[in-house]
Amino acid sequence: MATRVGAALRRAAPPTRRSTPPAHPRSVDVRRAIVQVAYRPDRDGDADPGEVVWAWVPYEDDPRQGKDRPVVVIGQAGDRLAVVALTSRPHPERRDQIAVGTGPWDREGRESYARLDRILGLRPDQVRREGSALERHRFDELVAALSRRRGWPEVELVAPR
């Protein structure tokens, strides 16, 4: 089922500082786009919904800067991958993150948290490497939390092929 997400598409400014890789210019903050949510991990080397992959993510306060970080692919938004960033820093006072467990995407085996306040649209060529698949129940919890946070109607996940 398609789901409508927040306000207008906004392009991040192209990177200009050393902390941004010039080879991966733009991501899109997916706020008003149809997101096809699905759980279809496939260890084929491509980024698939349900997988944790690595990509350059621009900072919100200065999109010309950013960092390489793990992201969860939650689906497609047109020709873009709809992703949410992961962090290993818990912020219990904030309601815009959800625990997604541990996995091979973090060398130190730390608990990871998905940020619910921002969904990005990345081109498939902006993904640098595949991490692993998020457990199905964790993916379902993440999508449910995004639905509650963003006012989406109940999301019906597309079954794996």
Image (tube, rainbow, N blue to C red):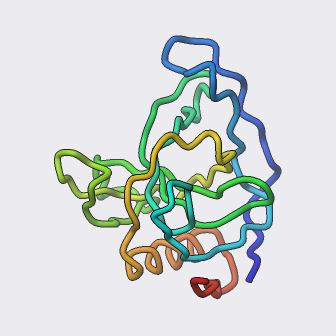
Between residues 4 and 148, which one lies in front from this camera angle? 4
Q: Position of residue 13 (x, y in %)?
A: 72, 25
Whether residue 141 sits left or right of residue 84 in the image: it is left
- Which image quarter: residue 68? top left
Q: Residue at x 72, y 67 (%)?
A: 35
Whether residue 10 sits left or right of residue 43 in the image: it is right
- In which quadrant of the rendered image does the C terminus lie? bottom right
Between residues 35 and 145, which one lies in front from this camera angle? 35
So how many labels did they put on this image?
0
- Which image quarter: residue 135? bottom left
Is 9 drawn above or below residue 158 in the view shown? above
Q: Residue at x 57, y 83 (%)?
A: 160
Q: Residue at x 69, y 83 (%)?
A: 153
Is 6 drawn above or below residue 3 in the view shown? above
Q: Position of residue 6 (x, y in %)?
A: 74, 61
Is 154 drawn above or below residue 114 in the view shown? below
Q: Residue at x 25, y 61 (%)?
A: 102
Between residues 62 and 86, which one lies in front from this camera angle? 86
Is 30 drawn above or below residue 136 in the view shown? above
Whether residue 19 sits left or right of residue 12 in the image: it is left
Between residues 71 and 10, which one lies in front from this camera angle? 71
Q: Position of residue 1 (x, y in %)?
A: 73, 83
Q: Position of residue 46 (x, y in %)?
A: 56, 55
Check the image and name the residue furthest to the left. 108
Whether residue 93 sits left or right of residue 62 in the image: it is left
